[in-house]
Amino acid sequence: MSTYTYYGFGLNIQSEIPFPELSPVPSFEQAHVNIRLGKVPAVPDGCSFSTGRISYVMNDSELLITVPDTGRYYVSGGHTIIMHPDYEDCEMRMLRLFVLAAGMAGILQQRGIIPMHTGSVLIDGKLTLIAGRSGAGKSTTLAGLLNKQYRIFSDDIVVLAEGAGSAMHGIASYPMIKLWEQSMQALAYEDRSFPIMPGMEKYGLFFHDDFDPHQYPINRVILLKLSENNGFTTERLSGGNAFEAVVEHIYKPSFFNSSKMRVLKFKTITQLLQNVDVYQIARPVNCAPDDLLSHVISLL
């Protein structure tokens, strides 16, 4: 059986199936993560919860993910993901989607690593994280920055890592920006060859040639949120306000609710905030992408 080797989320990944979303590497001495097809075991003594239609069972070292009409995923020890599709002709893009989302989030959680649900740009060797809830304009803003020749580091997930000195560093997940049809039209993008999933008007735009596997210090966080007001407001956050605003953007937050994970969250986000400026931009519900982009650029 063929094996494929990739680098993503700060880890060497070996897989039985190809992942065009990930950054390929020729080889490595040791895989940090192995992805394969197979039977999925039960998870004993786990905490059960659901988010939407997806259900989870989790204990300290195992995670079982069940996605109706797609498959089941078993994540264990911070190093193994086993996939079991519901159907022989299951759409592989759908199967991969949940590996790159909840599956890798489970791997990171088991390794004691915090992922952030943020995009990022690299400026003069330092990272600016850009975050916002769905619809706030994060990915559209990143695509606009890409059009203006800013260096996109990561679109959807940034992995936090301790670096030299006290500054928290960021590691990119994989080289793809995801955009809804409305944003594709607003930015005049024509490539719709990679829909994220069948029937969804959301598309992946790759930047493999510019993917950077190195980690860099984070010096700025920009948070985007929707407002009922007609204009834009920008506020600098500090102290507890900054902590509460930033911690909301941990990726897959339901994975980090145990007492051990709460300690990890507090320690990691506190360390991050020691060396970053945090800004919050409140934007109108209806605004042109260029208007939001100009407010973000003013903070870079």
Image (spheres, rainbow, N blue to C red):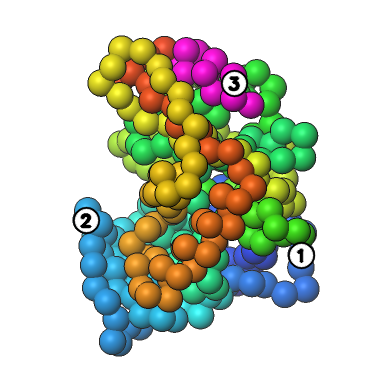
Number of the front mark, 3 or 1: 3
CB under 8 Å between discs 1 and 2: no
Front residue (pair 292, 2)? 292
Q: Residue 291: say if magenta.
A: yes
How far across and how far down the image is residue 92, in percent? 43, 54
In-image side of 212 versus 251 (left or right): right
CA gap, disc 3 to disc 1?
A: 38 Å
In-image side of 49 versus 223 (left or right): left
Q: Please tell me whether residue 52 is drawn above or below residue 65 in the rendered image.
A: above
Q: Secondary structure at mark 2?
A: loop
Residue pictured at 59% horizontal, 57% vertical? 271
Q: Is residue 11 visible?
A: yes
In-image side of 198 versus 276 (left or right): left
Q: Secondary structure at mark 3?
A: helix
User: What amino acid is found at the position of numbered circle 3 in the picture?
Assistant: Ile
Residue 297, numbered circle = 3
Mark closer to the chain start, 3 or 2: 2
Q: Residues within 10 Å of mark 2 (few under 14, many from 20)?
A: few
Q: Which residues are magenta?
A: 289-300
**Majority secondary structure of the magenta segment?**
helix
Front residue (pair 291, 19)? 291
Q: Residues within 10 Å of mark 1 (few under 14, many from 20)?
A: some
Residue pictured at 47% horizontal, 18% vertical? 292
CB under 8 Å between discs 3 and 1: no
Q: Secondary structure at mark 1?
A: loop
Q: Please tell me whether residue 1 is drawn above or below residue 291 in the rendered image.
A: below
Q: What residue does disc 2 label? A: 53
